Image (cartoon, rainbow, N blue to C red):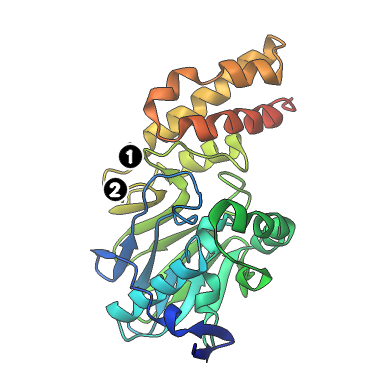
Amino acid sequence: MKFLIFIGGLVLSQASLAVSALPVSQIAPGIYFHQSAHHWPDQHNHGEIANLGFIVGDKCVAVIDSGGSPQQGIALRNAVKQATDKPICYVINTHVHPDHIYGNLAFKQPGVQFIGHYKLARAMASRGNHYLGRAAELLDIHVNQDNIIPPDLQVKDQMRVNLGNRELLLTAHASAHTDNDLSIYDKTTNTLWLADLLFLEHIPVIDGSIKGWIAELEKLEKNHYQLVIPGHGKPVQNWPAAMQAQKTYLTSLRNEIRNMLKQGKTLEQAVDQAGLNAKGDWQLYDEFHRKNVTIAYAELEWED
């Protein structure tokens, strides 16, 4: 006989409650981090491919991204419970991609507020049916509209949240990786959680604006941070040196495509020819590079 337990509107089976805590490391005082491997999302990894974590204050906890599956969300929630007795007060979704939001339902309970970029709700609404329709086939997970939870609090420019003697500064960025990227800065440790605005080893994935992404990186590289946490890859202390490979890839690709457009080359030619010299520099190049070229070409084609 299966027993069901209701927590904040979420139905959990005993099997769900028995999910092991997600492995996390405390990489700075009060900052807990789970690093995922660089994989194409599929039925073997269930879309659990993004870095996740949480920040603990004196009063409560902010979860940063919830995972690529409902089960990973439960595992992350269990990791929070293992690390602290402080309640979760915020779930911060850094952008719309499924590997960052499919665990949201595990945290939907009284006292928890979801935070996101002011364009996140619109992105969830426009992409939700497409994401949900492919989840079972591609990722072997079962999700529905309940798993896509729009933000209760929307960040238009910047927002400060206090976890109890620990203030986080949330920044809504211009279109870059997506058009709904959010970063989190922890003043206490001088840590910037950049999520998918920063890719290390894994090829950067453009789903917003190549020009906007370069512009955001140029702003960020002027600042000093003790620790920077990417959406894919290891946390780094050598900022801004750590982001130069990504910046080089994006700027080189932009420049190549601009030259091809001046020469009258077609999209098909650009997809076949642009960025070939970067192939050996990045994991998952074959899976994402051609799409990057397609998106960048479409944007740059309309430059004045």
Q: Is residue 62 left or right of residue 205?
A: left
Place of residue 8 in the rendered image (x, y in percent of width and height, measured from the top left): 55, 88
Q: Which residue is disc 1 drawn over?
A: 242
Place of residue 73 in the rendered image (x, y in percent of width and height, measured from the top left): 46, 70
Q: CB under 8 Å between callouts 2 and 1?
A: yes
Of residues 178 and 40, the one drawn nearer to the viewer in this rendering: 40
Q: Amino acid at mark 2?
A: Val
**Labels 2 and 1: the sequence-earlier one:** 2
Q: Is residue 71 left or right of residue 9?
A: left
Compared with residue 149, is residue 241 higher up or lower down, i.e. above or below?
A: above
Q: CA distance from mark 2 to mark 1?
A: 7 Å
Compared with residue 302, is residue 207 higher up or lower down, i.e. above or below?
A: below
Q: Which residue is disc 2 drawn over?
A: 236
Place of residue 302 in the rendered image (x, y in percent of width and height, measured from the top left): 75, 28
Q: Residues within 10 Å of mark 2 (few under 14, many from 20)?
A: some
Q: Residues within 10 Å of mark 1 (few under 14, many from 20)?
A: some
Place of residue 196 in the rendered image (x, y in percent of width and height, measured from the top left): 48, 49
Q: Secondary structure at mark 2?
A: loop
Q: Amino acid at mark 1?
A: Ala
